[in-house]
Amino acid sequence: MIRKQLLFIMANFIITANGQSLPDPTLNNNFNAQVKSVEEFIDRFNGIEDNPIIKHDNNRRRNNIIALFDYKINHEGLSKEDFKSKLTNFVSVVTNDSVYINITDEKTLAIASCHIVFEGKRYPITLVLQSEIYKSDRVRWAIVGVRGLSNIGIFDKNKLYPISPVEHEIHFMSLDNVFTHNQMGIFGYRGKSVEISEISVFLTMARFGKFQFDSVDNLSICFLGVPDYVFIINEKPHNGTNSGWLITQLLSIKENQKTNYIKNILGYENSK
């Protein structure tokens, strides 16, 4: 709430600084309707706060949720009518079953599109963070997944390299060459039954300073707590009242299929 008040004060200050003696009602209306933070999105979704352009009637929460959808949302190949039906069903599940979301829920993931610098070159990666409770009742964000290392050439779990089947006769002397001269391919010398994850590789490399973290370029928040649905929000600075943190993707996913969906997000799509 404090952040929203500060933003409103700043907006009015900018108007005054530009020499306008009276605030622009359209600008004020757009600013008030804008979803200015993830916290505000959650409050509107849960019915704690209202979009100022929404009427206070029995459909108040339903209409507030509908107003949280990006008007440019991807219809996932559905026709306009079919997507409208999907959206209506989603809102009905939320309101009829009294579903509420929380940023500290373990069914909420943050997906950060980032860049790192490795060997002098800038590369994109994706970090996935999950809210969790630790040390009794304290809450934190924790890194639970990494994607993109294979595109850099750091890690390819499908590529294996041989050590000669007679190497034991010379006491595996070639291991020196493996560890000294083929470090980029080192993961390929493990046994094919040995599982290794990108997050383990990433955190180990970070521990030994093998790359520099450069930037977070985009952030998505993924909510998995609505039965049979997953939705993602992004910050969309549109003109008008449909702006800010909005639902940009709505997926119909049965509860028993959400585990596989999470594996895909974490980069474990080939996990057994």
Image (spheres, helix red, strand yellow):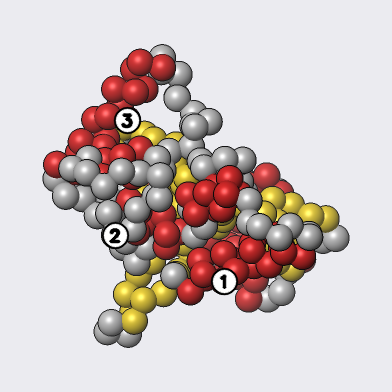
- Label at residue 42: none
Report whether residue 131 is seen: yes
Question: Which residue carries the number 3 mark?
Answer: 87
Q: In the image, what residue type sits under mark 3? A: Leu
Image-based side of 208 in relation to 145, left or right = right
| Nearest the eye: 53 or 172 | 53
Front-most of residues 141 and 260 = 141
What's the amino acid at mark 2?
Ile
Residue, disc 2: 48
Give the structural element (helix, strand or loop) at label 1: helix
Q: Is residue 16 left or right of residue 35?
A: right
User: How many angstroms separate mark 1 from mark 3 (CA)?
Assistant: 33 Å
Disc nearest the viewer among 3 and 2: 2
Which label belongs to residue 6? 1
Residue type pointed to by label 1: Leu
- Tell me which corner region of the image, top left, top right, bottom left or bottom right, holds residue 122: bottom right
Q: Extreme right residue here?
A: 120
Q: Is residue 196 above or below residue 272?
A: below
Between the residue at mark 1 and the residue at mark 2, the CA separation in whole angstroms equals 20 Å
Badge 2: how crowded within 10 Å, few (<14), some, or many (20+)? few
Q: Are marks 1 and 3 in contact (CB under 8 Å)?
A: no
Sequence-wise, which precedes: disc 3 or disc 2?
Answer: 2
Res 64 quadrant in image: top left
Total number of numbered discs in the rendering: 3
In the rendered image, which quarter contains the N terminus? bottom left
Mark 1 or 3, nearer chain start: 1
- Camera-side mark, 1 or 3: 1
Contact between labelled residues 2 and 1, with CB atoms less than 8 Å apart:
no
Residue name at image x 40 percent, y 44 percent? 53
Return the residue nearer the eye: 65 or 205.
65
Q: Residue at x 68, y 44 (%)?
A: 151
